[in-house]
Image (tube, rainbow, N blue to C red):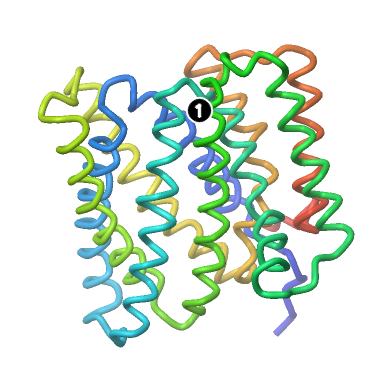
Amino acid sequence: MQARPVGALPLVPAAAFVLVWSSGYISGPYGVEHVAPFTLLALRFVVAAALALVLARMLRGPLRIDRGTAGRIALTGLVMNAVQFGAMYLAFDAGLGPTLASMLHALTPVLTAALAAVFLKEALSRRQLLGLVIGVTGVLIVLGPDVSAAGGPVGIALGVFSAITLSLGTLGQRWIGHGPDPIWSAAIQFSVSAPPLAVLALTLEGTHAVSDPLRGGIAVLFLAIVNSIVGLLLLGALVRRGGAGAGSSLFFLSPPVTAVLAWVVLGETLGPVELVGLVVAVVGVALGTGRAAPRLVS
């Protein structure tokens, strides 16, 4: 059997994954226009958990994860889903734009490497450090001096916090390891994320958190089915073909795709300076992940 080149990814699943991942930065801001953030997320994860549990039972059979591993999966899921998305959706509600949000999250692979160097004493290469510096520089260029247009200090702080918690959740995935079934793991993580978000929704947003049931319902279904379930299945296909780092190797493509989707769907435009910042950030992330040009195969 001929060996598959390192970094080779199937073209269609890779392109679909980037599109699905990027679309989350459109459906999120769209959703919070019609449903309060915590309510939107609670509904998303209730639906996603139900679908993931059915898929896991049908495709994988009974749950075969020990309690200790299940606990690590659940704790990581709370960080990656409830905390990370909670912060980002509050940032969306404050006015943070989809492209800038995508850029912050795109820094996750290199930010994770930096956090691993600090907390786990892992080596941080010069290339990763340079990529992080360039990526952050690109974000600052896009942000510009007018922070009010990006949700103000609160919106920006929440977006940065979301990126940090996503990186911490990524380290948590390493803590779990690659042994547990990914569909059952996702079902557990979706399930444990819904209750605390529902409590926050009822406590802080009340029973009148939905301003437009139709548009809000569409957003919930899109987030749960497309962004959560379809994204999970596509990531699984990429991991099987390209290895555990397959998803992170495509992170640098998300900001430009998000920018195009934001222009088409939401009418968001970027000026010349912001476009320069976008390019700088993309180069930084690509450099930091070491996968500036993953090989795509049909």
Q: In this view, does 55 lie to the left or right of 152?
A: left
Q: Where is residue 142 in the image (x, y as percent from the top left)?
A: 71, 24
* Residue 221 image-quadrant placement: top left
Q: Which of 75 and 231 is in front in this view?
A: 75
Q: Position of residue 188 (x, y in %)?
A: 29, 67
* Residue 50 image-quadrant placement: bottom left
**Quarter placement of the N terminus:** bottom right
Residue type beneath disc 1? Gly
Residue at 51% x, 21% y is 151
Residue at 64% x, 44% y is 106
Q: Is residue 154 left or right of residue 290?
A: left
Residue at 40% x, 31% y is 27
Residue that badge 1 annotates: 155
Q: In this view, does 8 lie to the left or right of 30?
A: right
Q: Where is residue 210 in the image (x, y as percent from the top left)?
A: 18, 24
Q: Nearer the viewer, residue 119 or 70?
A: 119
Under circle 1, the secondary element is helix
Total marks drawn? 1
Q: Position of residue 140 (x, y in %)?
A: 74, 29
Q: Can you name the residue that lies furthest to the left here?
A: 207
* Residue 252 image-quadrant placement: top right
Residue at 77% x, 48% y is 132
**Quarter placement of the C terminus:** bottom right
Q: In this view, does 254 lie to the left or right of 117?
A: left
Rendered position, 119 above or below 279: below
Q: Would you call the spot at circle 1 few (<14 residues within 10 Å), some (14-19), or many (20 or more)?
A: many
Rendered position, 72 above or below 267: below
